[in-house]
Image (spheres, rainbow, N blue to C red):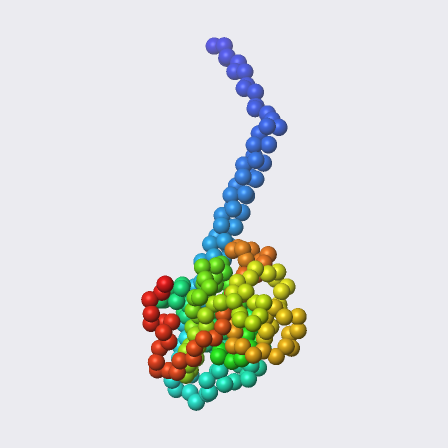
C-alpha cells in the first residue's frame, strides 16, 4: 500500500494589524475602566459625601440640643467672638425659601474638615445677633451641599438662626447707608465680603449694624468665583416663642 503524503498546512503568521488590534482593545478596556472609576468618584463626591455630612449633622444637633436643654453655658450671642471652639456647633440655620425641612447646624470654622460637617462660621466674625458680620461659608455641590440653592435666594427672603435662648431673623437686602448690595459675585480672594463692615478696604473699621453674609463657590461645580448673599438682622425673638419667618407661609 502506498502511503499518501499529507502536505502540512502553512502556519498563519502574525501580522502587524493583529498587534495593533490587540493594543487598541487593551487601550479601550483601560479607558472604560478609567471612565467607570471617574464616574464612581464623581458619584461619591456629589452624593456619597452627603452620608458623612448627614451623620455629622446628626451628632452636632444632638450635642447642641443637649447643651441647650441641660447645660449652664450662656447663649452664644453673649460670647466673645474668639470664645467658640473650632468644630463645635454655633447655631441652627433655617432658610424658609428653601423649604420647611431645610436646617443645618453651623459649625465653628471654615477649614476643609469643618466644611465637611456643615456650613462653617468664619472664626473672628460676629456671632449670631451681635454687631458686626456673622459670616458663613458652605459647599454648593458636595458634603450635603448646604448652599446648593443659594442662587434661589431673593431680596426680602428671611434667614433664621436658632441659639439657646433666641431666634435671630435676618432679611436679605441691600445694606442701608452703605454700598453693600444684597447679592454679589466676587473673586475667591475677595475676603473683604466677610469683614465686620463688608466690602470696605479697612478690616478694622468699627461696625454698627448686625449683618449676616453667606459665601459659596460659583458657578456650580467650579471654584472660579464666590457667590455672596448679605442680610441684616430685623428681629430677635426670645424662646419659647417662634419667629414670624418660620410660622407664616413662604411667598
Picture residue at 50% right of the left edge, 60% below the top: 140
Of residue 198 and residue 221, the one placed in the foreground of this image is 198
In the current view of this chain or complex, which residue is farthest to the front?
A: 177
218 vs 209: above or below? above
7 vs 227: above or below? above
153 vs 56: above or below? above
Residue 217, how many percent across, how many down?
54, 60
Task: Please give left or right for residue 204 compared with residue 143 in the image.
Answer: right
Of residue 211 and residue 99, the one placed in the foreground of this image is 211
Residue 63 visible within the image: no
Residue 161, how many percent across, how many down?
44, 75
Residue 160, how many percent across, how many down?
43, 73
Picture residue at 54% right of the left edge, 77% below the top: 209
Of residue 11 and residue 200, the one placed in the foreground of this image is 200
Picture residue at 56% right of the left edge, 72% below the top: 177
Picture residue at 45% right of the left edge, 75% below the top: 234
In the current view of this chain or complex, which residue is farthest to the right?
A: 202
Q: Quadrant of residue 22?
A: top right
Residue 205 visible within the image: yes
Amino acid at each position: 500500500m502506498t502511503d499518501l503524503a499529507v502536505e502540512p498546512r502553512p502556519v498563519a503568521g502574525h501580522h502587524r494589524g493583529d498587534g495593533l488590534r490587540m493594543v487598541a482593545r487593551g487601550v479601550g478596556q483601560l479607558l472604560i475602566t478609567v471612565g467607570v472609576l471617574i464616574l464612581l468618584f464623581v458619584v461619591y463626591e456629589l452624593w456619597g459625601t452627603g452620608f458623612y455630612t448627614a451623620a455629622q449633622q446628626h451628632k452636632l444637633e444632638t450635642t447642641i440640643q443637649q447643651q441647650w436643654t441641660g447645660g449652664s453655658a450662656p447663649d452664644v450671642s453673649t460670647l466673645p467672638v474668639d470664645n467658640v471652639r473650632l468644630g463645635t456647633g454655633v447655631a441652627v440655620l433655617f432658610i424658609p425659601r428653601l423649604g420647611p425641612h431645610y436646617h443645618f447646624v453651623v459649625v465653628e470654622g471654615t477649614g476643609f474638615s469643618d466644611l465637611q460637617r456643615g456650613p462653617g462660621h468664619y472664626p473672628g466674625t460676629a456671632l449670631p445677633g451681635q454687631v458686626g458680620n456673622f459670616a458663613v461659608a458652605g459647599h454648593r455641590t458636595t458634603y450635603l451641599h448646604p448652599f446648593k440653592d443659594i442662587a434661589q435666594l431673593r431680596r426680602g427672603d428671611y434667614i433664621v438662626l436658632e441659639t439657646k435662648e433666641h431666634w435671630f431673623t435676618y432679611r436679605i437686602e441691600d445694606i442701608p447707608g452703605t454700598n453693600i448690595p444684597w447679592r454679589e459675585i466676587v473673586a475667591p480672594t475677595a475676603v473683604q465680603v466677610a469683614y465686620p463692615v463688608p466690602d470696605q478696604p479697612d478690616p478694622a473699621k468699627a461696625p454698627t449694624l448686625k449683618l449676616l453674609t453667606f459665601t459659596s463657590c460659583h458657578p456650580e461645580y467650579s471654584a472660579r468665583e464666590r457667590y455672596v448673599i448679605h442680610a441684616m438682622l430685623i428681629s430677635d425673638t426670645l424662646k419659647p416663642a417662634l419667629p414670624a419667618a418660620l410660622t407664616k407661609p413662604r411667598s
